[in-house]
Amino acid sequence: MMCYRAVHPCAWRSYNEEEPCVLRFVNLEAHENQRAHHTLGLGSQDLVLRRGQPFRLMLLFQGRAWSPRTEGLVFQVLLGSLVETVPVQWSRSWSPGPGWSAHCSPGDVHPMSATIQLCSPASASVGLYRLAVQIESPAGARHYVVGSFVLLCNPWSKEDSVYMPVEPLLQEYVQSDCGLVYMGTPHNVSSRPWAFGQYEPLVLEACLSLLQVSPQHLRNEQVDYVRRSDPVYLSRVVCAMVNCNDDRGVLQGKWDGRYGGGVAPTEWNGSAEILTRWADSDFRPVRYGQCWVFACVLCTVMRVLGVPSRVVTVFNAAHDTNGNLVIEEVFTRRGEKCPRRSRDSVWNFHVWVECWMERPDLGSGFGGWQVLDPTPQERSAGEFCCGPAPVWAVRRAAVGVPYDTAFVFAAVDADVVRVILDRDRVLGRSVDRTSVGRLVCTKTPGADRPEDLTRLYKGPNGAKRNLDATAKWANETGLSPSLSVSLALEEVPALGRSIRLCVSLSNRCGRRRLLRWHLHAQLKQFDSNACAPFWHVHKELHLQAGEVVDLHHSILPSDYESLLTCTDIVNATVVVKDTSTKERVLATEEFSLPSPHISFQVQGGDSVKVKTEHAVHVSFTNTLTMPLSKAVLTLEGFGLFQAKLYSRAVLLEPHQIMKLDLSIMATCPGTKLLVATVSHGNGHAVIAREFHRVVVTGPTPVVNQLDRFVDQ
């Protein structure tokens, strides 16, 4: 069944009495066009198309039939003040040219109707276009406004600079509306779900608004429209607009743990609410975000715009502010981490985005995955954005390649200098050339497991470059090479079980030593300094010449359970002192603990039908050794139900179960997310977070209000 849009003439000049050919309706064939362009579900008001690919529309006339041999059809495509005039070619065969083109064949003309194909160039600018058509004859011309359409990048087109030839990767990096973000530490990688939400209502419109309120557009609208053809330019504009540090951007960052007047970063589970909140508030920044929130919102916008994108986590990511590829960490004589003595830091994990595109601005060899980092850390060309930096250039330490490759290289390959201080007196130094960038990963296409990308970032050139940067530190170390210490986990830790640590000491000199050592554990957030120690042990030990010993210790659940949340990281450090020479050696290890399991049961299995109610049962068992006071189970369903659901606060004893039952009903097909969290205590500390995917099957709703009357 077709629905048509009526048209009315804007102007008419008649030179004879013959009845004119009047365009009355236009069928934009929205469902068929969007299915062919892989845009079903994107947007709600306008036709959504991809550049470099033809689309069809049907014109219906009244008065008399259109005569292609005596009357011409000319389309006008308008982006802001930019206008393209596109005459319709009348021929039996057609090959779209390098610019805008339109075609009608004899077989597409019927009594009182004609089907036209239009095609944009593969390098057309991204944005919201207006479309008009003019019927020209010797008797005069009549002009009609047909409507509007959105044009996006086309990774399915070989001519587009974002072309990606592998269909499963297109499904994962363009069409998938949910994914995983990896967190924690390299020893215990945890994941949290994220709903990218590009098919949610008004998300496409919010992404287009982001381009319209960017500083580049406000400075020079026409230049901005022209440059939107380039995904390199688009990516820099969007990257800067995701944070609000120097524009009307989407998110305000905050890292001090005080989130009054906003939402704590850990509470966000999807991009759609953030983007629509921003657009609905007249583009005031949404509070608050941290690296994974910034990155996931950027990933959503880039996928909406048609650029293949994925969220990437770098474990032990360095923030090198002065560009010397050296990060300094300071410890007390007992091994406690000190407050930062410089702006440099190492985060347990940092999240950014990779986007797939060619780099014609750099020449051949630099295309493929490009790093974009929207977390506001340093300025790039005057704005808080980072990238696109070619991953190829990062691996080869080509730090002069634009944009911001040196900063990205340091994040994955800087050296760490650890200094032991006592009243500003240096007691010892050590250089760690391996911990930064220990693991780089993203979600595996089609699977819920991490894909290791480390080898794509870290190559032999990087290690050689760092040797020069830290040679002076190695020469000044002041540490005895005859005494070594290491600290390691004996098994993967888990909440409710003891954390087992092993300290290994090796005396390589020819004399007996009396060693005094301090081992302690501190809690910390992924991006901050450690808190005061919550557990420690101090001992002395005689170590014979050539002797190697392993010292085993356990941190009991009662030592940490009341303190730890599912986002906390444990920093364990041991400092060993030779009581005779006063030499000190330090070893450190950081790890996280996996959260307890939350169980999901969906009526009928994990594949449900669109617009059909299904019951869901969610349950959590307290596997800790202590009771949880004021425990609350919270459930959020993206595309499955509207508001968050909360259980009643209870005292949850060990091994006791809490449940939440509800009904879900999806309004459109696709993969949807259920996200459950368990919090407890007056501070609502989150002890567990887990997600569950639900595959919704059924017909995609036909796009509304696309086939309509045409305006004059």
Image (cartoon, helix red, strand yellow):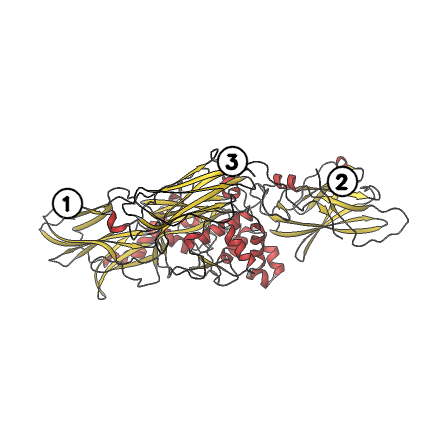
Foreground pick, 291 / 675: 675
Query: Badge 3: few (under 14), some or many (20 or more) residues near its Cα, within 10 Å?
Result: many
First in sequence: mark 2 vs mark 3: 2
Query: Type of residue at label 2?
Result: Ala
| Residue at image point 10% right, 58% down | 580
Q: CA distance from mark 3 to mark 1?
A: 60 Å
- Residue 659: give x, y in percent of width and height: 40, 42
Query: Type of residue at label 3?
Result: Val
Q: Nearer the viewer, mark 3 or mark 1?
A: 3
- Residue 323: give x, y in percent of width and height: 37, 59
**What residue would you read off at disc 3?**
608
**In the rendering, which numbered label is found on residue 145?**
none
Left or right: where does residue 398 sit relative to residue 545? right
Foreground pick, 467 / 155: 155
Foreground pick, 545 / 557: 557
Q: CA distance from mark 2 to mark 1?
A: 88 Å
